[in-house]
Image (spheres, rainbow, N blue to C red):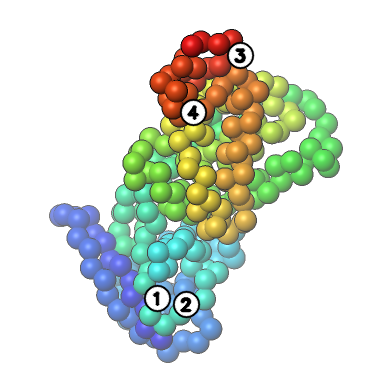
Amino acid sequence: MKIKVARYTTEPEVTETVLEYEAEMKDATLLEMLNEIKTKQDPSVTYASGCRSSVCGSCSVRVNGREVLACAYKAQNGDLVEPMKNSPVIRDLVVDMDRAYAFNAKAKAWQKSPASSVSLTQENEKVNEIQSDCILCGSCYSACPVYAVNEEFLGPFSLTRVWRYVSDAREKDPSDKIDSIQTNGIWDCTLCNECTLVCPQSISSKSDIEKLRSKSAMNGYSDPNFANMFGGGFGGTMFDGSPSF
């Protein structure tokens, strides 16, 4: 079996090459094949891995232009393996995810402390159960096309976490989170659904963003793009119900 691996270095300058490797393996995961290449052919090949059980998310890469977990994806002859998009490459298939994680802080994607002492029911838990399964692989962040035109977009990676906490019954006042996602946030999403298609946990960030839009409308916000269609007649992002034109 032959696969191609994109090789990136950043020192002394950014360089990119694509090397082809061959290994006598059948029904092997991509991670198993990369391990075989690194231990027996080219020790300089650099990639990340951890649990090997699709739990830690550290082995996420792109194969033939689509985000996958290397430990779960079955390698195919001729595959092209590349690093994740929208993040600086450190070396080869390893990227720096600090910027993606920083958007969580901008979006206030955390549980307030102290949380309300509400006793959660099974129904409460089911509301955001799947969002809690996020493994931080960054596949949705890599797949999002909005970053090509807006590098400050909070993105599906952070916005789905915002919904995780906004929908939590223990969150007394989620209004500050709703406030934080109006600029470069929910209204900038194109709802293309690329994030959902690549999520290994089947989390629909598109659906979460739609729910955040509904929650924002309940808090008095409206889509600024809609307002701009009418020459700003609705007076910005806030709409108080009174005519402004």
Q: Earlier in the sequence, mark 1 or mark 4?
A: 1
| Mark 4 residue crowding within 10 angstroms, few (<14) / some (14–19) / many (20+) | some
Distance from the alpha carbon under mark 4 to that under mark 2: 45 Å
The answer to the question of whether label 1 and label 4 lie on touching residues, with beta carbons closer than 8 A, is: no
Q: Secondary structure at mark 2?
A: loop
Q: Is residue 209 left or right of residue 96?
A: right
Residue 110 visible in the snapshot: no
Q: Which residue is mark 3?
A: 241
The circle drawn on residue 75 is: 2
| Quarter occupied by the N terminus | bottom left
Q: Residue at x 71, y 33 (%)?
A: 168
Picture residue at 51% right of the left edge, 34% below the top: 186
The residue lying toward the viewer, choosing from 234 and 151, is 234
**Residue at left 56%, top 16%?**
239
Q: Quadrant of residue 212?
A: top right
- The answer to the question of whether label 1 and label 3 lie on touching residues, with beta carbons closer than 8 A, is no
Q: Earlier in the sequence, mark 2 or mark 3?
A: 2
Q: Mark 4: which secondary structure?
A: helix
Q: Determine which of the numbered discs, if any, sits on residue 140 in the image.
A: none
The residue carrying mark 4 is: 226
Q: Are marks 4 and 2 in contact (CB under 8 Å)?
A: no
Q: Which residue is mark 1?
A: 79
Q: Amino acid at mark 4?
A: Phe
Q: Name the residue nearer the viewer: 109 or 49.
A: 109
Image quadrant where residue 160 sits: top right
Look at label 3 and name its amino acid.
Gly
